[in-house]
Amino acid sequence: MSKEKSWKQLILDLAKAISESLSGTSRARTWHQHVVPYEEGWAVRREGNKRITSKHRKQSTAITKAKVIAKRKKADVIIHRASGGIRERIGYGD
């Protein structure tokens, strides 16, 4: 009986996963650029990426680079403080 129950649960879980994927509940990736503290300086990182796009000694240089990318992709620039919190958000979307 326990095997039968586990198969039923497996099928229900699979059906739920398929239903959620077809309903469009997952978020599409964005091109928002985050300016974040990195090692001894600052980095630009695309939202959702672990890897950085570029690294800079000064925050102002990182912000300039992030703005160039965000303007091209019609995205936002999210500027973080050295402590990690968000300082400012600049939008270049439509």
Image: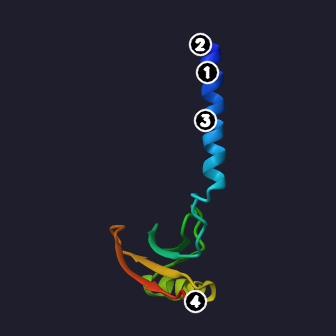
Residue 78 picture quarter = bottom left
**Residue at x 45% of width, y 83% of height:** 58
- Compare marks 3 and 4 and give the one earlier in the sequence: 3
Q: CA distance from mark 2 to mark 1?
A: 6 Å
Crowding at mark 4 (Cα within 10 Å: few <14, some 14-19, many 20+): some
Q: Could you say which disc has been placed on residue 71 in the image?
A: 4
State the residue position of label 2.
Answer: 2
**Residue at x 55% of width, y 64% of height:** 48
Secondary structure of residue under mark 4: helix
State the residue position of label 1.
Answer: 6
Q: CA distance from mark 3 to mark 2?
A: 16 Å
| Residue contact at pointers 2 and 1, CB within 8 angstroms | yes
Q: Closer to the camera, 77 or 65?
A: 77
The picture places residue 93, in percent across and down from the top left corner, at: 54, 86
Quarter of the image where the C terminus is located:
bottom right
Crowding at mark 3 (Cα within 10 Å: few <14, some 14-19, many 20+): few
Secondary structure of residue under mark 1: helix
| Model colouring | rainbow
Q: Could you say which disc has been placed on residue 13 in the image?
A: 3
